């Protein structure tokens, strides 16, 4: 099954602006399990989307869905496989759309990007800072992925965080990582000036679905109260990416629940919304 093939025939790699890359990686989830089933659930739910998103038809730019990345073996091997899949997309000057899987998959995508360019920053939507040095014995934990990216010298801005440990707080303070945590976003609907000055014009967006409030996204490994709701999240995405070029993005940490298929649909709609923002650049 291909992403949104109910509306658009699958495109050849060279003809598609968007390359959807399923990455069912799950090795370090520490609470609720099931993220490995996330990519397939998002693709299945995408068959219920409408081609017109209210303003345009982003799918008309072409969507190519790759085979799921092999995520067997030890973490570095799986991340290299993700890196190769993203590199193949970038070699055609297309936009990678990585579907997780746990948040660690972002590291594979970023490794592919940094081999080709050094002029981009990362916009992170997340309930968690993901800035631990190690967690439960591994530096490749979902709780460490943004720490690894920052250590590569990539500018980072965080939105929606509301759960972080003292180590992460100290690291974020020391590195002066810009952020707008969930508590500072509550009640806001307009987000002009939300991005740091001099942040790169090219951006990679990583969206951990637990950035949403559990009321609308219960199907994720570690749901945290006090999160974003749909219109607020979309408005924030629009403001954060205004006058910027999205060179890739991922949507991660869906742990499908057969009793909450609305969460699968929300994730698929988010992917399509990000496609619309990327195409508008």
Image: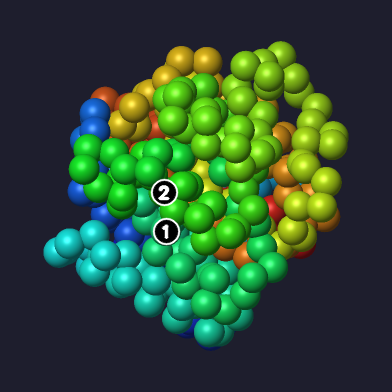
Dot 1 crowding, Cα within 10 Å, few <14, some 14–19, many 20+? many
- Which residue corresponds to the image point at 52% horizontal and 28% vertical from the top-left? 169
Q: Earlier in the sequence, mark 2 or mark 1?
A: 1
Quick one: quadrant of the C terminus? Answer: bottom right
| Apparent side of residue 69 relative to residue 205 in the rendered image (left or right) | left
- Which residue corresponds to the image point at 24% horizontal and 33% vertical from the top-left? 30
Residue 105, picture quadrant:
bottom left
- Residue 168, image x, y percentages: 47, 32
- Could one spot residue 144 in this view of the protein? yes
Which residue lies under the disc numbered 1? 107
Residue 122: assigned label: none
Marks counted in the figure total: 2
- Residue 262, image x, y percentages: 40, 31
Q: Secondary structure at mark 1?
A: helix
Q: In the rendered view, tell whether residue 110 sits above or below residue 227.
A: below
Which residue lies under the disc numbered 2? 145
Q: Between 253 and 151, which is closer to the camera in this rendering?
A: 151
- Residue 271, image x, y percentages: 52, 50
Q: Between 135 and 65, which is closer to the camera in this rendering?
A: 135
- Which residue corresponds to the image point at 68% horizontal and 19% vertical from the top-left? 184
- Could one spot residue 230 in this view of the protein? no
| Apparent side of residue 156 relative to residue 200 in the rendered image (left or right) | left
Marks 2,1: beta carbons within 8 A? yes
């Amino acid at each position: 099954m291909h992403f949104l093939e109910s509306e658009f025939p699958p495109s050849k790699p060279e003809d598609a602006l968007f390359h959807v890359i399923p990455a069912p990686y799950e090795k370090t989830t520490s609470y609720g399990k099931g993220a490995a089933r996330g990519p397939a659930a998002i693709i299945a739910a995408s068959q219920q989307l409408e081609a017109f998103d209210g303003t345009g038809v982003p799918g008309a730019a072409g969507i190519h869905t790759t085979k799921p990345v092999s995520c067997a073996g030890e973490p570095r091997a799986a991340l290299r496989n993700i890196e190769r899949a993203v590199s193949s997309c970038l070699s055609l000057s297309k936009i990678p759309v990585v579907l997780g899987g746990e948040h660690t998959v972002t590291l594979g995508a970023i490794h592919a990007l940094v081999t080709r360019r050094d002029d981009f920053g990362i916009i992170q939507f997340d309930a968690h800072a993901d800035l631990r040095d190690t967690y439960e014995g591994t530096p490749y934990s979902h709780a460490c992925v943004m720490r690894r990216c920052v250590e590569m010298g990539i500018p980072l801005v965080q939105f929606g965080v509301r759960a972080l440990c003292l180590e992460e707080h100290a690291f974020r303070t020391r590195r002066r990582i810009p952020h707008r945590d969930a508590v500072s976003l509550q009640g806001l609907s307009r987000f002009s000036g939300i991005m740091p000055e001099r942040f790169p014009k090219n951006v990679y967006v990583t969206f951990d679905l637990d950035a949403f409030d559990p009321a609308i996204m219960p199907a994720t490994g570690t749901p945290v109260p006090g999160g974003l709701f749909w219109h607020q999240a979309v408005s924030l995405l629009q403001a954060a990416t205004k006058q910027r070029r999205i060179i890739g993005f991922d949507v991660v940490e869906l742990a499908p629940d057969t009793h909450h298929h609305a969460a699968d649909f929300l994730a698929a709609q988010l992917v399509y919304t990000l496609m619309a923002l990327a195409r508008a650049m």
